[in-house]
Amino acid sequence: MTTHPLLQALLPLVDDLSRELAEDERYRRLLGTLRALIPCDATALLRLDGEQLIPLAVDGLSPDTLGRRFAIAEHPRFAALLAQRTPTRFAADSELPDPYDGLVEEHVGHLEVHDCLGCPLFIDDRPWGLLTLDSLVPGSFAQNDLDNLEAFARLAAAAVKANQRLLGLARQAEAEQQLAARFREVAGQAGRAELIGQSAAHKRLLAEIDTVAGSDLTVLIEGETGVGKELVAQAIHARSPRARKLLVSINCAALPDQLVESELFGHVRGAFTGASGERSGKFELADGGTLLLDEVGELPLAVQAKLLRVLQSGQLQRLGSDREHRVDVRILAATNRDLAEEVRAGRFRADLYHRLSVYPLVVPPLRERGRDVLLLAGHFLEQSRARLHLRGLRLGGEAQAALLAHDWPGNVRELEHLLGRAALKALARQAERPRILSLEACDLDLAGTAAAAASSVVVAAEPPSAPLNGDLRQALDAYQRQLIQAALTRNADNWAATARELGVDRANLHRLAVRLGLK
């Protein structure tokens, strides 16, 4: 007996319904089955999250697509697909811009998608997301493809629902959405903290966040400058029982020493010159919620002692007042310094360090996260595309390779700023405003970034005594090594004094010295 071709194509998807598969593997197989059923250049599965669509899996699209967040209001094709319960086809002459223009990997000399097919997925009669198919060849899709996609979409919805049940994602996602919505309402923040990545290091970080978020433990968030420590703090708070209360943040490094105590604990009228009235401190504002002490390693020793008392007793006194206030605050602390080393050097109280590091959580640097750099690049490119009012903003192949090869001393923050500059630079060199803007390796100027980083290590040091040979990376390393050694000599091998002279964070200088073989 001959099996119907449609049924034959859907059998692998039916078989997967009974298997326990990892979420990304289940969705990857789902899209593979879809491309076998309906030949095309690219497919994608996107989940509806409020007013945006989040790609969960792609096949045939650039890997940075997974990091993009498509605002429905900015993409009329997605809005049109979500408005229907059945598949929709957009012909080659459709005036609606395609969100995937420039993102199809096999673009063969042209960037724009010419045939598009999509279908919404419904779970429990509620819209859950979209399946999309795209082709670079006009007229690729016929009427029977719409019929096949509708049948496939029903099985795909069943696969998604099975996956949610197996992993308990449905209840968790609903709870997180409610908590995040309440958090935005109370805190007045426009967006939700989102940590983007799929690497093993990133998944370990998310697992640790889930582990500690439900407790009331004090968390010390450690990591290099620019890794996203504040986003981690927001994620911990959003997943905690305190999410309906405020998350209050204070940057301990941005305040003069004489104002830190007032900012933390508040003050009464006349407590110091200019104190014309009473003011609540960050601890009182965060009562019942969470307080993030960002750059906690910068706190003066005198303030550290008072902070320790509040953490131990839950009681504080406003500056200039004898009356005590009791507060119930969860503490999250963030630092790019090695606080254990600060304790040994006498710059940080040991008792406060132990009180803060009940649960130390290290945020991995970007260079240890592999291809996450492309997902994050896609996220930032989509933001830049909207700001620059472009139809498409993409990375060329050499630009992707350059991003993957870079060391990222400035981590995610460096990536964000670099891509923003690159987009403006690439746009400026266009004779006419393009529909799709491609960023090439020359636009990223990673060599110039590395040179700037090297020059920023030292602001008062002698030039190299001899010419440097070799490639750029070797030359930069040799130059930095020579400048650091010269500064160390001037400061009698005192690393803290050397860091101050060079104008860099001591923890970052330590990591650089280790890489250069100076430690």
Image: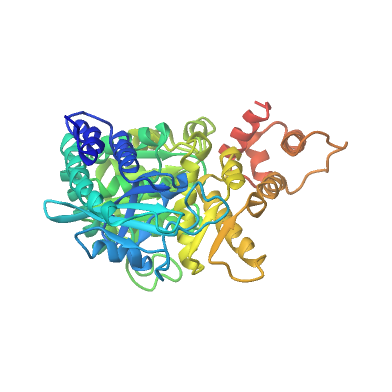
Q: Nearer the viewer, residue 302 or 454?
A: 454
Mark count? 0
Image quadrant in which the N terminus is located:
top left
Residue 16 found in image quarter: top left
Query: Up-down: is 68 above or below 168?
Result: below
Tell me what residue is drawn at x 30 percent, y 45 percent: 236
- From this viewpoint, which residue is outermost toward the right? 466
Q: x and y percent of residue 237 in the render?
A: 28, 48
Tell me what residue is drawn at x 46 percent, y 42 percent: 335
Image quadrant in which the C terminus is located:
top right
Query: Up-down: is 507 above or below 188?
Result: above
315 to the left or right of 272: left
Q: Which of 243 and 158 is in front in this view?
A: 158
Residue 422 found in image quarter: bottom right
Residue 322 found in image quarter: bottom left
Q: Say if residue 189 shows up in the picture.
A: no
Q: Which of 31 and 220 is in front in this view?
A: 31
Q: Say if residue 374 shows up in the picture.
A: yes
Q: x and y percent of residue 315 in the render?
A: 25, 49
471 to the left or right of 380: right
26 to the left or right of 292: left
Q: x and y percent of residue 3 in the render?
A: 19, 34
Q: x and y percent of residue 209 in the render?
A: 31, 38
Tell me what residue is drawn at x 75 percent, y 39 percent: 472
